Amino acid sequence: MSVPAKAFQQWLHAAAPDVSSAEIARRAGIKRSTLAQQLVRGKVALGTVVAVSRALELDVLAALSGFDRYRDLATDRTPPSGRELLSQIADLDLLQEILWRNSTSTPLADAPLPRLSPPPHRSSVRWWVDAIDSGDLRQRLAKDLDMAPQNISTQITANRLPPAVAVQAARIAGVGLAGSLVVAGLLTPEEAQWPQDARELALRRLPDSELTALASIRLDALSRSLRRAEQDNEQTKALWENLG
Amino acid sequence: MIEMLQWLALAMCVFCAAWRLPAALRGRNPGLFGVFVLLVIAVGLSLPPIYLPVDAALGGRNLANLLVRFALYGIFFVLALKLAAAFRSPRAARVIRGPVGLTVLAVVCLATIVLFLLSDLPVSRAGLVGYLDQPSVRTYSLAGRLYPAFVAACMLVPAARTALTAPRPAERIAAGLIAASLGMVFLLTVLQLTMLPVGALIALLSYGSIVLLAAGLTVIWISVRRQRRFASTAHR
């Protein structure tokens, strides 16, 4: 996913007229050669726009919506749903919350908010898709983006969510567009204008029973993926030790 | 065409053996290094320019051909155990190492020696060309195919399964090449059993299978070395 280099340069010129592209790259923490290459190829990665916006202390969401394909990012004000917010809490943070609730007698309403690791986590994509999918999301994504459904599923399983897929998935599901870029790892929740402490509050409001059920689903999936990884490693080890 | 394939197979086996020599000396997988050394002997002795002087040194009575047979049995026995472990098929390993496999091997070895002694092979000829009108020589040459075909039949399914399910592309490619190689070994024995006049096809399959096997093992060797390089730079 990218924006046209020409549009990027126009935007950059308007935002920081006196700064050289070498200086921009340095401040944004991008290699000069990477930026130059993206400009030559005519496609600037969305990650570059985000990094440059941060370096120039601009509103990242507003910057992104300055590009044609992302106009709707700024106008869309859909807040993240409760399920979306919970989907962006790491497995271990859910478990910490269970432990914490069982170790304290403080009423939940008076307790300090839990401290959560910043999104995305190691299975962010999968659980986000799970939270917004009403049944045919993968097929519709594949059709809209002209990709093989198999590829979409592989990416989701591998916890990869290219920004183009993220935004399109949010459009199809009718959920907040900016939030999809949080899941994609491009924006922070603040940049996506999620309400303050939204994930923490969603977690704290979750009854014990639902928290436990959620953690159990997560652990189940985690154990399956760990088992798969272990089997893969064993196969690799067997091949290498005997034929390598 | 066939001769070019033979030289190519020989070159690949020499290359693989040489490439593995330093690691084998350090104790890494000496069995597989041995397989390549035996392959060099077996393929080398199928080429008249190598066969004739070697056989002359052995007395000029085609003992070198017997050497090729036993080299092949050794190759397939060691390779089968390595492949069974690599493709995680304890059942195949049990068959090959157990009573069934060892009986097949013993019978084939015995038959090879007996048939060789029964045959009249006064003049040194690579591949025993010109003696195939003798029934004992034809049976001898067929017996030599049976053990490799038995091993290939045991290992074909585990190899194909790994080719389809291995986690990394390099592993799938390697297992696929090895599976194709085993399939060719099995097929060429079936062809030989039919007694059809397809000698050229059989030669094509047998040397082609060696090339594919060497290629498959090379893919694994490269991926192991690359991984070790990553690991060693990560430790630094």
Image (spheres, rainbow, N blue to C red):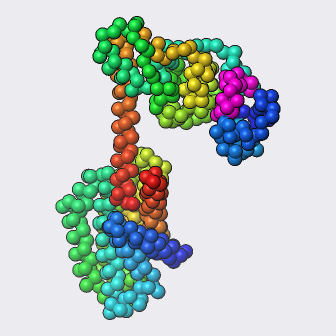
Say whether residue B223 is magenta. Answer: no
Q: Name the image quarter holding residue B110.
A: bottom left
Residue B195: tell me if it is visible: no
Q: Is residue B142 above or below residue B62?
A: above
- The N terminus of chain A - image quarter: top right
Picture coordinates of residue A46 (x, y %)? Answer: 66, 32
Closest to the observer, A238 or A146: A238
Closest to the observer, A184 or A173: A184
Residue A190: tell me if it is visible: yes
Horizontal relation, residue B135 to residue B221: left or right: left
- What secondary structure is the magenta-colored segment mainly? helix
Picture coordinates of residue A68 (x, y %)? Answer: 75, 26
Picture coordinates of residue B55 (x, y %)? Answer: 37, 88
Q: Which residue shows up at 47% across the image and 86% down it? A: B49
Q: Which residue shows up at 30% across the image and 15% down it? A: A102
Closest to the observer, B73 or A105: A105
- The residue stretch that appears in magenta: A47-67
Say whether residue A58 is magenta. Answer: yes
Closest to the observer, B221 or A153: B221
Picture coordinates of residue B32 (x, y %)? Answer: 35, 66
Q: Name the image quarter holding residue A188.
A: top right
- The C terminus of chain A - image quarter: bottom left
